[in-house]
Image (cartoon, rainbow, N blue to C red):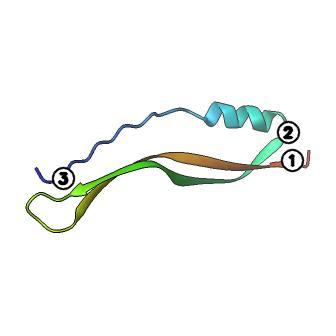
């Protein structure tokens, strides 16, 4: 095997948190997600030219709320 892929994720339910914020009088206006790299490791390929790189990171949620009109 020349390359490897490892994946681990933590699934959390943020719906209750968002609902609690909206219950306080705020309205979810926009939600976005970005991938933040936390580390990387590279090494030369075995019996080939170039390098392999493994990147680790996390997905970060960005939520924008607006005060509701009511």
Q: Is residue 31 above or below residue 21?
A: below
Q: Is residue 38 left or right of residue 51?
A: right
What distance separates the C-alpha of mark 2 from that of mark 1?
6 Å
The crowding category of the residue bearing disc 3, from other C-alpha atoms within 10 Å (few below 14, some 14 to 19, many at least 20), is few
Measured from the top left, where is residue 28 in percent x and y? 73, 48
Work out whether residue 1 or residue 40 is closer to the camera in this orientation and state it: 40
Pair 3/1: label in front = 3
Query: Residue sitting at 56 percent across and 46 percent down?
Result: 60
Q: CA distance from mark 3 to mark 1?
A: 49 Å
The residue shown at (60%, 35%) is 14
Is there CB contact under 8 Å for labels 2 and 1? yes
In this view, 24 is above or below 37: above
Q: In this figure, which residue is indicated by the disc labeled 2?
A: 25
Q: Along the polypeptide, which appears first: circle 2 or circle 1?
A: 2
On screen, residue 13 versus residue 4, left or right, reads: right
- Tell me the distance, in whole angstroms, between the alpha carbons under discs 3 and 2: 50 Å
- At mark 2, the secondary structure is loop
The residue singled out by tag 1 in the image is 67
Q: Position of residue 34 (x, y in %)?
A: 55, 54
Question: Label 3's element?
Answer: loop
Query: At which x and y percent is residue 10?
Result: 45, 33
**What residue is disc 3 on?**
3
């Amino acid at each position: 095997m020349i390359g490897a892929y490892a994946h681990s994720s933590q699934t959390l339910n943020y719906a209750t948190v968002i609902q609690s914020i909206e219950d306080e009088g705020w309205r979810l206006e926009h939600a976005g997600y970005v991938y933040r790299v936390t580390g990387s490791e590279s090494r030369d390929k075995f019996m080939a030219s170039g390098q392999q790189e493994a990147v680790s990171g996390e997905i970060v949620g960005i939520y924008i709320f607006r005060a509701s009109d009511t």
